[in-house]
Amino acid sequence: MNQKFQSIKNAGIIGMIGNIFLLIIKGAIGFASHSQSMIADSFNSASDILASLMTFIGNKIASEPEDQNHNFGHGKAEYLFSLFISITMLIFSLKLFLDSLLTLIHKNTFTFSWILVIVCIITIITKFILYRYTKKLYQKYNSILLQSAYKDHRNDCVVTTFTLISIILGNFGIFYFDGIIGTAISIWIFWSGFSIFMESYNVLMDVSLDEATKNHILELVKEHDKIKDVSDLYATPIGYHYVVILTIFVDGTMNTFDSHHLADHLEKDIVSLEKVTKAIIHVNPI
């Protein structure tokens, strides 16, 4: 297993350990004090555990090399498991939204405790450390699983900060803000889940390269004077990279060796692009 997949594996394991710890303390204190925002935050940690588990499994499958049955490797496993993560987040968010709405309607209160404040501070510190750790790995390896993880940790820092505010306000008898925060957290989780869902769905449905990258490829083609024309520029995603397929036209009098040598040079130029992992070039005479 190369360094990239080992690093993602470690991020998944560390994320699971951290989120299990937070789930236990937030769940216990939240239900004991009847704080809807803390209970919502604990459900968020539960979804984070599943997300870390999916990161671990998806990365393990994606790390498998290409074989006879999977000619382009297993890179799409990252997006498949990201899709599972997003669906779970959507389900959790709807349940939390309903519970928080009922809390507002029935004007429920909770028992203030400084332990709630301490739990929030511990959560913020823990999540900020996880955020910095996974973001650093994402900047190095550009993996969607790491991207989902670091954004989730960042969002949790913000969400728990608002949870802390609602708990402090509860000490002054302002309890309605607790239900509002619970509702806001559920909407936040829903939007995050929807964003991950759409990104994963687009890749699994073989969405093509963006126009800017396509134009960049065409500019690379123009740098080779012996290429007379280009057509059939296609791209298919395999994980977070693309396989590019195109047809170039050369002078019909050019011998086979020279035309293939030209195609090899163009392939190297295209593969040097950040989003491209493989280029397949067909050569036709004109």
Image (cartoon, rainbow, N blue to C red):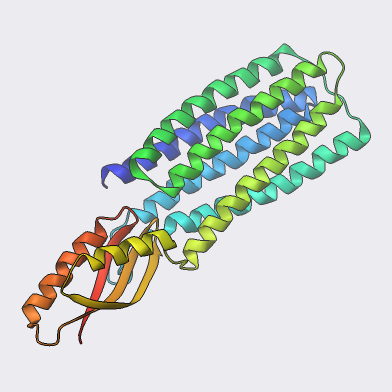
Instruction: Farthest residue to the right: give it.
Output: 106
Res. 165 image quadrant: top right
Could you say where residue 279 lies in the image, as x and y percent from the top left? 26, 67
Left or right of 21, for residue 259? left
Left or right of 166, for residue 190? left
Left or right of 12, for residue 19? right
| Whether residue 66 can be seen here | no
| Whether residue 182 can be seen here | yes
Say if 29 sits above or below 50 in the image. Answer: above
Quadrant where the image shows the C terminus: bottom left
Say if 228 sits above or below 57 in the image. Answer: below
Could you say where residue 89 lies in the image, as x and y percent from the top left? 63, 47
Res. 227 image quadrant: bottom left
- Residue at the image point whose x is 26% and y is 46% from the top: 2
- Residue at the image point whose x is 25% and y is 68% from the top: 221
Left or right of 18, for residue 102? right
Could you say where residue 96 lies in the image, as x and y percent from the top left? 75, 42
Q: How many badges with numbers are in the image?
A: 0
Could you say where residue 52 lies in the image, as x and y percent from the top left? 50, 42
Say if 284 sits above or below 139 in the image. Answer: below
- Residue at the image point whose x is 75% and y is 14% from the top: 113
- Residue at the image point whose x is 84% and y is 40% from the top: 101
